[in-house]
Image (tube, grey):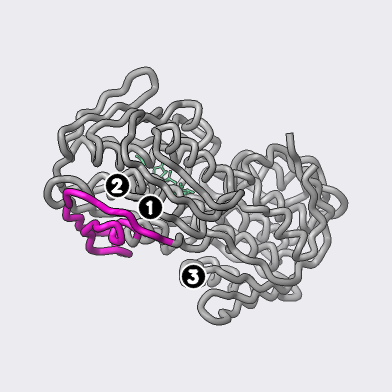
Amino acid sequence: MDRFKIEGGRRLEGTVRISGSKNASLPAMAAALLTSEPVCLQNIPGVRDIITMAKLLAHMRARVESPDLPPSEFTIAAETISHAEAPYELVKTMRASILTLGPLVGRFGFARVSLPGGCAIGARPVDLHIQALEKMGAKISIHHGYVEARCERLRGAQIHFDKITVTGTENILTAAVLAEGETVLTNAAREPEVTDLIELLIKMGAKIEGRGTSTLHVHGVDKLHGATHAVIPDRIEAGTFIVAAAITGGDVKLTHCAPQHLTAVIETLAACGVEIQKEGVSCLRVRAPKALRAADITTEEYPGFATDMQAQFMALATQAEGKSEITETIFENRFMHAQEMIRMGANIAIDGHRAVVQGPTPLSGATVIASDLRASASLVLAGLVASNTTYIDRIYHLDRGYEKIEEKLQDLGASIERI
Ligand code: UD1
């Protein structure tokens, strides 16, 4: 099994190109199931989850073609679908497989999708997705770990999400675009990945109002058509490289990113003393201060501080002068990385949803295990500033969501290798 070997203590300098967003690409690929015409998606990141989604669509007998390897572009043609099913073998490696449920029921009136079950960061149910589809007229049953949904044609409905859910909003949007009549989603997620999906759906002929807000009006149409769409840059990858520059005393330019999606991260890091300058529409220059200052964060839905950046911020807080308080409000079990950072010498106290980090503490290299995607990224960051050698095991988590992370870090001067 692959692992990373990192020799810490190098200052990062140079330019890094940010890849397309994994979390925007996955719903966009699933949305291609909504039409018999080809949908061409560009700026797709070469990461494992994308390959899993491509396999899932191919399992359903959609044609999935890419001119390059690893793919940065896909043309997906779902003329007919003979297996409207997401099998357990694929769902267990990627929860986002649930994103095929909405488009399949919306277009074919049938779907069978394995339930994702728990994961390292908490229970993560899909009850809100299911309740919304039932409200739209789908008959849902759960057998042998699979959710089965059937209907003649979905009907528009008033859907209020009791809790803001990103993939839930995306699933119901993709179900509603072909439903009969109007669907109104309230308390919908406003994440940029949801807005990007709406843009693709509109290009495909969908009628949706309210993009970027928490109330979405969807007027169902009879048919959608093909489209070409470049997905947005990955704001979490960008945020991770911003922290990498800041934590190593570096000076790094990020290109092909979307600064407007990074406001909460930029404001927090500015409070830590990091200088972040916008250059043109898609570049950021990040310059670390002589000494980082502590700051408090509370994870929130967009436009708040993203839970997917919490672990990386914790790595930075271990190197900042003073006490940083980190409150996690989205997932119940998302401090697993803290235990590994403590083993490296960090001073972190956990109390339920709150972590208090006292810094700065020198970190020393150790062998650590990554528990999920963003936790792995935070351990890489910790390894970049630790003395001596850090080994990170289970880096398959990183390969799920970061494109060539070790190559990008090497280009900036880090000593990191895959062994
Ligand atoms: C998405 C992102 C993930 C990010 C998360 C929060 C993708 C593929 N993944 O995950 O990277 O960390 O948003 O920004 O885009 N919930 C329920 N019932 C439901 C659905 C959700 O109780 O039916 C709860 C969850 O347990 C969690 C909260 O709502 O506590 C938010 O989850 P959600 O926004 O759905 O996360 P994902 O869409 O799975």
Q: Residue at x 55, y 55 (%)?
A: 72
Q: CA distance from mark 3 to mark 2?
A: 35 Å
Give the SS element for disc 3: helix
Look at mark 3 in the image and give the residue it sits on: 263
In which quarter of the view is residue 15 placed?
bottom right
Reading the chain from its start, which is encountered first: label 1 or label 3? 1
Disc 1 C-beta below 8 A from ligand 1: no
Going by the numbered disc 3, the residue's amino acid type is Thr
Q: Name the quadrant of the N terminus.
A: top right
Look at mark 2 in the image and give the residue it sits on: 35
Q: Residue furthest right?
A: 388
In this rendering, is residue 109 above or below 376? above
Q: Which residues are magenta?
A: 200-229
Crowd band around label 2 with a 10 angstrom C-alpha radius: few (<14), some (14–19), many (20+):
many
Going by the numbered disc 2, the residue's amino acid type is Thr
Q: CA distance from mark 1 to mark 3?
A: 31 Å
Asked if the magenta segment contains residue 201, the reply would be: yes
Q: Residue furthest left?
A: 181
Going by the numbered disc 1, the residue's amino acid type is Val
Relative image position of residue 397 (x, y in whole percent): 62, 41
Look at mark 1 in the image and give the residue it sits on: 39
